[in-house]
């Protein structure tokens, strides 16, 4: 399974903050449950995730950079 790095988790929290998103909003954008969204943004520890979640996180981070 792919690994979310601490840098990716930080970037995800930055997107959430910049767009004034709640965890519920973030979960909807990522296509995951609110509990999963909380887990993804909780700390800076590397985290194994499913391919679908990894791709969604990368898409959200990249779309912010454009």
Image (spheres, rainbow, N blue to C red):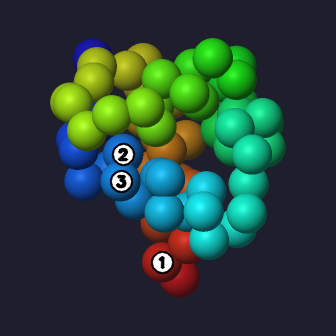
Residue visible at 55% across and 41% down in the picture: 56
Q: Choose between 21 and 4: the one closer to the eye.
A: 21
Q: What residue does disc 1 label? A: 65
Q: Position of residue 25 (x, y in %)?
A: 79, 43
Which structural element holds mark 2? Answer: helix
- Mark found first going from the N terminus, 2 or 1: 2
Q: Are marks 2 and 3 in contact (CB under 8 Å)?
A: yes
Q: In 3D space, how far apart are the residues under numbered discs 3 and 1 (Cα atoms)?
A: 14 Å
Q: Is residue 9 left or right of residue 36?
A: left
Please identify the quarter of the rendering in which residue 32 is found. Answer: top right
Q: Is residue 20 left or right of residue 46?
A: right
Given the current orientation, which residue lies at the most extreme bottom position? 66
Residue 3 — which label? none
Q: Where is residue 44 in the image (x, y as percent from the top left)?
A: 25, 38
Q: Is residue 8 left or right of residue 46?
A: right
Q: In 3D space, how far apart are the residues under numbered discs 2 and 1 (Cα atoms)?
A: 15 Å
Which structural element holds mark 1? Answer: helix
Label 2, residues with CA under 10 Å away: few <14, some 14-19, many ≥20:
many
Residue visible at 63% across and 17% down in the picture: 35
Q: In 3D space, how far apart are the residues under numbered discs 2 and 3 (Cα atoms)?
A: 4 Å
Q: What residue does disc 2 label? A: 9
Residue visible at 73% across and 63% down in the picture: 20
Q: Can residue 52 be seen in this view?
A: no
Relative to 56, say whether 38 is above or below: above
The N terminus is located in which quarter? top left
Please identify the quarter of the rendering in which residue 63 is found. Answer: bottom right
Residue 10 — which label? 3
Q: Is residue 60 visible?
A: yes
Residue visible at 28% across and 20% down in the picture: 48
Q: Are marks 2 and 1 in contact (CB under 8 Å)?
A: no
Q: Position of residue 58 (x, y in %)?
A: 44, 51
Relative to 7, say whether 37 is above or below: above
């Amino acid at each position: 399974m792919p690994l979310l790095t601490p840098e990716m988790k930080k970037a995800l929290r930055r997107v959430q903050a910049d767009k004034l998103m709640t965890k519920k909003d973030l979960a909807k954008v990522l296509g995951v449950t609110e509990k999963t969204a909380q887990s993804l943004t909780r700390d800076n520890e590397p985290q194994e995730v499913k391919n679908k979640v990894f791709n969604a996180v990368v898409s959200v981070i990249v779309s912010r950079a454009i």
